[in-house]
Image (spheres, rainbow, N blue to C red):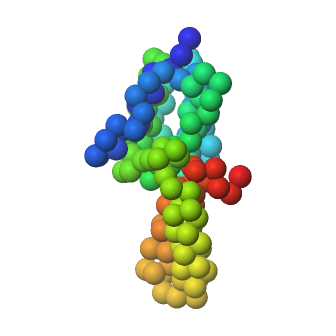
Amino acid sequence: MALTVRVIAPDKTVWDSEAEEVILPSTTGQLGILPRHAPLLTALDTGVMQVRSGKEWVPIAVMGGFAEVDKDEVTILVNSAERGSDIDKEEARAAFNQASERFTKAQQSDRQEFIKATQAYKRARARFQATGGMA
């Protein structure tokens, strides 16, 4: 038995295939989905979701959204998403380092800059993690 998984961003469908397991970055923590999971609707945080297809885990960086689970179908609607294999690792590392520096400096800054720096840090961290960085 398998799950039908769809990851849909406004500009593209990032994943549309069967999988044995999905791990989602929900706003309350990591959430594992297996076949015959109870119906569920949850908000997603910026992070890395993992899809197990066969024996391989496929990392996908997601930038917030929602996931619905119903009758072995997992539909994930996100603001933006990229497969880890589609992200340049060195570019992601550089962006992460820059975002980390901005985040550190913003802690002594005003609240609005801190919020922007936090969001940029989370996006850069998710992209870098999806490439296999920060293992």
Q: Residue furthest top?
A: 1
Inspect this view and state whether residue 133 appears.
yes
Task: Tell how many labels.
Answer: 0
Foreground pick, 41 / 121: 121
Residue occupying the point 58% across, 85% down: 105
Q: Position of residue 87 (x, y in %)?
A: 49, 52
Q: Residue furthest left?
A: 11
- Left or right: residue 104 versus residue 14 is right
Question: Is residue 75 shown above or below 113?
Answer: above
The quadrant of the picture occupied by the N terminus is top right
Inspect this view and state whether residue 38 appears.
no
Foreground pick, 134 / 37: 134
Q: Quadrant of residue 23?
A: top right
Residue occupying the point 48% across, 68% down: 120
Q: Quadrant of residue 103?
A: bottom right
Q: Quadrant of residue 37?
A: top right
Q: Residue furthest right?
A: 135
Q: Position of residue 32 (x, y in %)?
A: 61, 33
Question: Is residue 44 shown above or below 57?
Answer: below
Q: Position of residue 10 (x, y in %)?
A: 29, 46
Residue occupying the point 49% across, 74% down: 117
Q: Position of residue 44 (x, y in %)?
A: 48, 47
